[in-house]
Image (cartoon, rainbow, N blue to C red):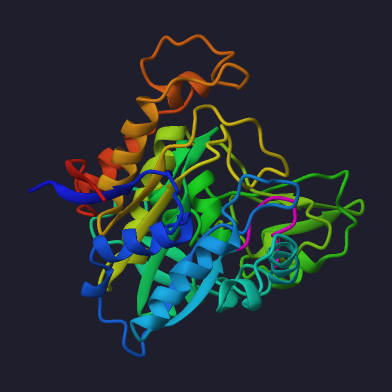
Amino acid sequence: MEPSKVYYSDLRARPGMNLLQKLEKLMYAAKIKDIDFQNKYTAIKMHFGEPGNLAFLRPNYAEVVAHVVKELGGKPFLTDCNTLYIGGRKNALDHLDSAYKNGFVPYTTGCQIIIGDGLKGTDEAIVPVEGGEYVKEAKIGRAVMDADVIISLNHFKGHECTGFGGALKNIGMGCGSRAGKMEMHSAGKPFVSTDACIGCGKCIKICAHDAPHITDGKCAIDHNRCVGCGRCIGICPTDAIQPGMDEANDILNYKIAEYTKAVLEGRPHFHISLVIDISPNCDCHAENDAPIVPDVGMFASFDPVALDVACADMVNKMPPIENSQLGHMPHTHGDHFTDSAPTTNWRACVEHAEKIGIGTQKYELIKI
């Protein structure tokens, strides 16, 4: 396979060319015009930031992407799917409130926001994964699958489970419904925190397999009956029902790659990564630690695998910042992401993504 083209711009901004203009120039240089956007619904998949976190991408960047899509005749909307955990984005109402709090409103972004998997994270499309080794049918937010074109706008940063979060994680994990996220994170069997359970029985009413039961005012889930659909997680009013996080990190990365294939296959897609504010953990945290390396730049490609590898390579060329998580860790692995989170292996995701035909790890870096 020939190397994929990855386009790159540094973050120098002189009079007459600000960073937003450079982003637009980067998108056109990377040939986004090759996509037919005319009257096409275009999902711009990004992370709106957990309230309290300040490392997420500013809405100004989203506005540039939406503007370019509209200029090319498309109908853009920003989207993300609900989370599994307790926080500000566990259902569509809280998710929208969090997005608004962080500045993502139509007046700043130039387009609407649609939460991809609906009110409670249960509005999903079941998508076959051709050649999937770990996932045969991915559970993807329905609004994501209804789109004609996919654009991923990624904040490239470290991650405590996957090594880093870039294009593949933004799409694969980010587009999964709550049940899909549980499938990636675990063997698919939720558990109950009895301290939080109020014995309301809503989980019993929504389960088609008679798995939850109330005993002495508390819920218990029969894992022999449970199929891991995640509906009980979405319906629980106190978040007492939680997903099990028992998959090895490599398996998690393989599943993310297969979910990415489910989202992208059969329609145009384009990917942008901003390698700035490179915090060691996901933007799903309600805080952000200090960046582990200096800001790098902006990248764009039609190939999310090549894009992730190019961004990782550029980060690994940067010096660690002394007063950061990476600065306090021993540098024994020759890789900033593994040094920062030693139990992770980010290469598992890109290797599996290449294996199942999403893209190639080989790239040609073109600076504009």
Furthest-left residue in this view: 1
Residue 351 can be seen in this image: yes
Q: Residue at x 45, y 59 (%)?
A: 153
Q: Nearer the viewer, residue 42 or 221?
A: 42
Furthest-front residue in this view: 15
- Left or right, residue 20 beside residue 265: right
Residue 136 can be seen in this image: no
- Left or right, residue 64 beside residue 288: left
x and y percentages locating residue 204 in the rendered image: 75, 66
Residue 74 location, quadrant: bottom left
- Left or right, residue 364 beside residue 87: left
Q: Residue at x 51, y 22 (%)?
A: 340
Q: Nearer the viewer, residue 41 or 69?
A: 69
Is residue 207 one of those drawn in magenta? no
x and y percentages locating residue 226 in the rendered image: 60, 56
Is residue 84 one of those drawn in magenta? yes
Query: Secondary structure of the magenta portion, mostly?
Result: loop
x and y percentages locating residue 39 in the rendered image: 36, 90
- In the rendered image, the vertical position of residue 233 relative to residue 326, given as above or below: below
Q: Magenta stretch: give its range.
A: 82-91
